[in-house]
Image (cartoon, rainbow, N blue to C red):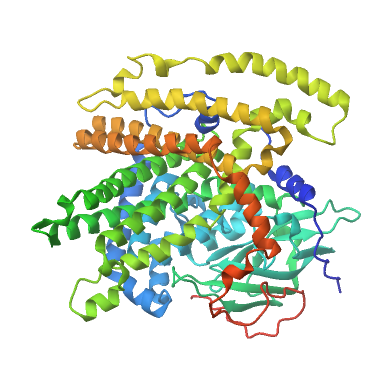
Amino acid sequence: MSAPQQKPVVTEREARQVAEAAREQDWRKPSFAKELFLGRFRLDLIHPHPMPPDEDARRGEEFLAELRDFCESKVDGALIEREAQIPDEVIAGLKDLGALGMKIDTKYGGLGLTQVYYNKALALAGSACPAIGVLLSAHQSIGVPQPLKLFGTQEQKETFLPRCARTDISAFLLTEPDVGSDPARLATSAVPEGDEYVLDGVKLWTTNGVVADLLVVMARVPRSEGHKGGITAFVVETDSPGITVENRNAFMGLRGIENGVTRFHQVRVPAANRIGPEGSGLKIALTTLNTGRLSLPASCVAAGKWCLKIAREWSAAREQWGKPIADHEAVGAKISFIAATTFALEAVLDLSSQMADEDRNDIRIEGALAKLFSSEMGWLIADELVQIRGGRGFETAASLAARGERAVPAEQVLRDLRINRIFEGSTEIMHLLIAREAVDAHLSVAGDLIDPEKSLSDKAKAGAQAGAFYARWLPKLVAGQGQLPYSYGEFKREVDLSVHLRYVERTARKLARSTFYAMSRWQGRMETKQGFLGRIVDIGAELFAMSAVCVRAELLRTTESHGREAYQLADAFCRQSRIRVEELFGRLWTNTDDLDRKVVKGVMAGTYEWLEEGIVDPSGEGPWIADATPGPSEHTNVHRPVR
């Protein structure tokens, strides 16, 4: 028997080194967003807006029509919300449609849809029931199909992809009870024994895990003779002896998702099921997420469109003080925000997805920005809808129906969307991840200057390299096309969007200068300035969204009948966005970050415990983090495969 690996003790520096090693180190293709953070507005990388080939669009539209018919006739979202489970017959119907194989190549039995149409399908299915969107997304965006597509052997693809395309549901297992965004502390072990690995450990929040047939499991292989070791990815059959789904978790939203706790005890996995070499698991996970994260913006786009529809219909029907509430400025401003921001969400998603399909650009930052921006703005849209609906927004759809009114699930959408700010990288983690990529060019030339472990000779060499880089780079941040009154004239129509593109160009240079000033000021302490880095990233996200809406508006002007209206929405969004950008710039240097750190120290030291007096804590007893000691399960297996 193999001995389970002890939970590793990891220092802060070691954790950063593990994360850094998992990054893609090189930029082999251009990146619009990376250039934006460097102060270079490369509009040529996104304009004219890329378009899918006609045949891809035809197949995508045909599937969307079939999926729409299925969702309208077979999916009862209220039933799924009420019973907290997607009926087996609905899942069976999705399998028959081929929805499990939307992203899988046709040669393996899939539909071979592009990323653009895959996301459109997720938005459509998610509008009928968000839990269905999550089921399909967790299976294909981060489950078995995507890692195998990118890193699997031909034999693995031929073995597993046909199953994933039609019959088998998959899940992705990385998180553990005491391991979230810090995978260096991963405790699940995979000990080599002959032609097998023996897995021991516990995985938490395994979306689809309760019903999955196949799992992608991240486990730590100990270093030994003939084994490099490190965090490694495996395809695991869920019915393997020693696997127990110990609990199906329940949440404030997405009540229909099959998310659980999975224990591995002496589970034998063939070495042939290892994805990639030992130690490449985190890199596989991060690369998979580059495009996998685009599934979350799809759900936000769906929610935004629905919120806009409800806001429009309700605000026309509801009257206060002699006129529809839409005619009151306080409500009208909210409707304008919902409409303009929904246009932006779709612009960001479609542009990022088409860029992923073309594979001409490196979209690791674009995909992360899309996830960050959409999850935050989608939540605000839903919150504004609840406010517009007033008491009816807080009331459940079932209660509304019971007293004879339209069953509008506004509060449910708010609950369902909340997880997007946490799923697949919380907002705080996304800020740090994007910031690391955004300053990559600086660290590549000046990183040794701020590394305390580098020698004086290394620092001297880095200083020379940095001097040469900044001598070329900094002068380019002084002036640009954004200062020329006729730049981007092709975007000047009845509504003038060229002014916004000039603003983006100027502001990108200002953003790059601000980043440089901060690095000069804080040097090695820059990584601790998470408030500053978060604002830098948020500014970049707004600039990316502004660019996307302008390019999309011009595309719709040339291809659709509502180009004029698209220009109006783009103009409204850009003007709203510019206000947010200016506020963020102000908060770069005028903020309460230092004071906040002092207050936090006081809170954690118990200085303010008196402030907690006068309440009753309704929390139950128990540890903050459940015990995840490897060993046999003491729970009933609640695994429920859908056949």
Q: Residue furthest left?
A: 322
Residue 578 visible, this angle: yes
Q: Is residue 287 left or right of residue 488?
A: right
Query: Quadrant of the image for the N terminus?
Result: bottom right
Residue 126 percent across, percent down from the top left: 38, 60
Question: Taking 381 as reference, is 546 above or below it?
Answer: above
Q: Quadrant of residue 46?
A: top left
Residue 345 percent across, percent down from the top left: 37, 45
Residue 285 visible, this angle: no
Q: Is residue 268 left or right of residue 642?
A: right
Q: Is residue 80 left or right of residue 586?
A: left
Which residue is found at the position 30% from the left and 49% from the top? 338
- Front position in the image: 50 or 627: 627
Q: How many marks?
A: 0
Q: Quadrant of residue 515?
A: top right
- Front position in the image: 506 or 279: 506
- Front position in the image: 84 or 492: 492
Question: Taking 454 as reference, is 72 above or below it?
Answer: below
Which residue is found at the position 79% from the left and 49% from the top? 14
Question: Taking 340 as reference, is 51 above or below it?
Answer: above
Residue 431 percent across, percent down from the top left: 57, 45
Question: Taking 242 as reference, is 519 above or below it?
Answer: above
- Front position in the image: 361 or 605: 605
Q: Is residue 223 left or right of residue 398?
A: right
Which residue is found at the position 51% from the left and 75% from the top? 250
Residue 167 percent across, percent down from the top left: 49, 67
Which residue is found at the position 84% from the left and 26% from the top? 458
